[in-house]
Each structure stands twice: as structure tokens, then as C-alpha cells.
Amino acid sequence: MPYTKMSGLLVMVLMFISGCGLFQPELSIEAAVAQLIPNDPSVAVGGNADRLIGDQEILLATGFWVKEASVPRTGGKRINDQMMKNLVVAWANGTLIIK
């Protein structure tokens, strides 16, 4: 297919949309919670801020759990009681989230 102004415009639009995060892959609940606040200062240790659950992120996760709301970037997944326990343990122990 030859490169035309229309195909160039389509490429630019797709790049813009993907840069806005509209085509981000679904994450596990643990990974999504760890990334709720990019570079969370409460866990800024060795560049792993988005792989650790910080203080503000565990509070946000608690809000999703209490309200039974879906967690962003998970495709509509919700935090159940067991998952909330797992998140609290990961937060308290400083566990790296690798999923």
C-alpha cells in the first residue's frame, strides 16, 4: 500500500491514541494497584515505584474494594476479600509485583 496523506494521518492518530493509554493491555489487579500512582513517592526505592504498592495506592485499593468498583486497567476486575488480603500483605512486606 503506497504511503498517502490519509495513511500518514491514520498512523498519527493511532500513535496519539496509544500514547494516551487507550490501548494499554489489561493488567493483573496487583500490577494495576502498584501503578495507580505513577512513581509513588512513598515507595520510590531503586526505581521500582511502579512495582511496589505504596501507601496511597493501598488506600485507593481499599476504596475500590469497599465500593466494589472495578480497578482501572484490569478490564473490569474487582477486588474481593482474598485479593484485598493479598494486597495488604504485599504492601506491608514491600513485595515486588511482577505480574
Image (cartoon, helix red, strand yellow):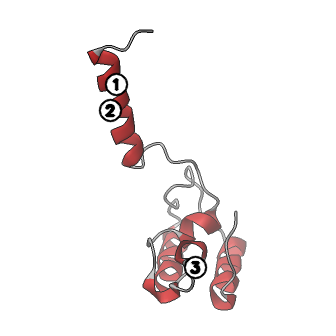
Q: Which of 36 and 40 is in front in this view?
A: 40
The residue positioned 67% from the left and 72% from the top of the image is 97
Looking at the image, is mark 2 or mark 3 earlier in the sequence? 2
Looking at the image, is mark 1 or mark 3 earlier in the sequence? 1
Would you call the spot at circle 2 few (<14 residues within 10 Å), some (14-19), or many (20 or more)?
few
Amino acid type assigned to the residue bearing label 2 in the image: Val
**Circle 1: element type:** helix
- Give coordinates of residue 79: x percent, y percent: 61, 67
Q: Mark 3 points at which residue?
A: 53
- Give coordinates of residue 16: x percent, y percent: 33, 40
Q: Name the residue under label 2.
A: 13
* Quadrant occupied by the N terminus: top left
Q: Nearer the viewer, mark 2 or mark 3?
A: 2
The residue positioned 65% from the left and 86% from the top of the image is 94
Describe residue 73's horizontal placement relative to residue 21 as left or right. Answer: right
Mark identifier at residue 56: none
Q: Which of 62 and 44 is in front in this view?
A: 44
Q: In which quarter of the image is residue 47?
A: bottom right
Describe residue 39's horizontal placement relative to residue 28 as left or right. Answer: left
CA–CA distance in space, label 2 to label 3: 33 Å
Would you call the spot at circle 1 few (<14 residues within 10 Å), some (14-19), or many (20 or more)?
few
Describe residue 3's horizontal placement relative to residue 31 as left or right. Answer: left
Q: How many marks can you see?
A: 3
Amino acid type assigned to the residue bearing label 1 in the image: Leu
Q: Name the residue under label 1.
A: 10
Q: Are marks 1 and 2 in contact (CB under 8 Å)?
A: yes
CA–CA distance in space, label 1 to label 2: 5 Å
**Circle 2: element type:** helix
Q: In this view, does 54 lie above or below 97?
A: below
